[in-house]
Amino acid sequence: MPETVLNETTATVSPRLRLSELAPGVYQSEIRAMTTECDRIGGVNLAQGVCDTPVPAPVRDGAIAAIQAGHNIYTRMDGIERLRRAISVKQKKDYALDYDAETEVLVACGATAGLHAAAMALLNPGDEVILFEPFYGYHFSTLVSMRVKPVIVALAEPGWTVDIDTLRAAITPRTRAILVNTPANPSGKIFSRGELETVAQACRDRDLFLLTDEIYEYFVYDGAKHICPATFDGMRERTIVMSGFSKTFSITGWRLGYVTADARWMAAMAYFHDLTYVCAPSAFQHGAAAGLEQLPASFYTRLAADHQSRRDRMVAALRDAGMEPTVPAGAYYVLAKAARLPGRTAAEKARALLAATGVASVAGSAFFRPGRGEDLLRFCFAKKDDDLDDACARLRKL
Ligand code: PLP
């Protein structure tokens, strides 16, 4: 992974030996840059959203057993039947949504690959997709990489609320979809039922797809319940639900997620997923299926409770460090104010914090349009308890 920003000088050798039009604008993500720097100085990495909490036993053992049982070859392009069925059962149990395991479930190489497949299948170059800001960088960059234009709608502070007039004003004849990430990275916002109804209404009125990234569906705090907008009237047929196992089962490196959507869209999504990945990792699919089949409801409530406790510790430490955190309602990130740190930009402030405390965070600017988010840092609290406590103690010394 290159560490420098690619520019025209590095990108062009001769008029024909050169990178694509898109590639010169590619840069290494701030998150990876901070991770590299953190590893170099041996700090505590709260930059990357890798939850390094233990993998649940049925998931781990299910994958190991699958390798030993010889499940090591390509699977059907949309995933093994066992996992497609388990996902279908899960969507029914959690949200009373019916998805046919044969035609309406795609096992993908992460929610990331799910969005890629959905965008390839549904969007054309020049189309516009609405993203709420602060946004998850991969959403923005994935769309750009397909020559789709992300149109940014700022969530209003405090509380990162949806302003209906701003949303409606952003919809143009080129708009094809709205993308909602709830619970959200990096803000921890959970879209309220009212906000989701508003978004859904805009989708119905203007005949748009709704792309939902629900990867943090089980990371909801203070008794909140996750709402899947595909459950709203007239929304199932136009909602592409993307989620995955990276976060819930702490298997970010296994690359396993899924999409559930109406059969009309699914075959094309599976086709594009096949072109890039062929299939999701075979043995890991069995592990995830075992997790869905065997883990009791208490696993998910415990997951939320454990992360709520981590959230509370993180928020308290940031307050003690004078960094004014916004308390997240879900997901596992906290945005905090960086005003007291030296530096002109959030990236400089993040490096100053790393140098002073050994705690790596991500510059808030990574989640906003240029010029915004420069007063914010994002901290990930999905860490082993010892590491989190170490990070909190270091922050308090600031
Ligand atoms: N979506 C959001 C909002 C995320 O924050 C992340 C990881 O940080 C992902 C998707 C990645 O999901 P996956 O590992 O399933 O590709």
Image (spheres, rainbow, N blue to C red):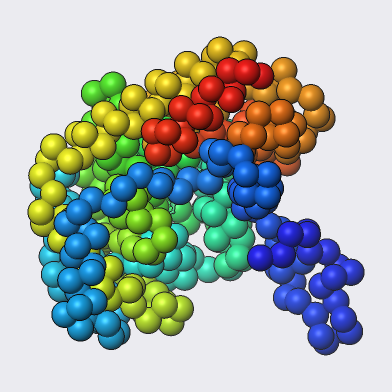
- Residue 259 in percent (x, y) is at 31, 61
Q: Is residue 196 visible?
A: no
Name the quadrant of the N terminus: bottom right
Task: Please tell me which residue is depicted at 62% across the width and 49% down the height of the picture.
Answer: 39
Q: Nearer the viewer, residue 220 or 125?
A: 220
- Residue 64 in percent (x, y) is at 23, 69
Task: Please tell me which residue is depicted at 46% across the width and 32% down the height of the picture.
Answer: 388
Name the quadrant of the C terminus: top right
Q: Nearer the viewer, residue 296 or 16?
A: 296
Q: Nearer the viewer, residue 277 or 149?
A: 277
Task: Please tell me which residue is depicted at 83% across the width and 87% down the height of the picture.
Answer: 16
Q: Nearer the viewer, residue 236 or 92?
A: 92
Quadrant of res 224: top left
Quadrant of res 362: top right
How many tags in the picture? 0
17 w.r.t. 172: above or below: below
215 w.r.t. 338: above or below: below
Q: Is residue 311 visible?
A: yes
Quadrant of res 109: bottom left
- Residue 40 in percent (x, y) is at 68, 49
- Residue 97 in percent (x, y) is at 15, 50
Task: Please tell me which residue is depicted at 31% across the width and 55% down the height of the picture.
Answer: 245
106 w.r.t. 188: above or below: below
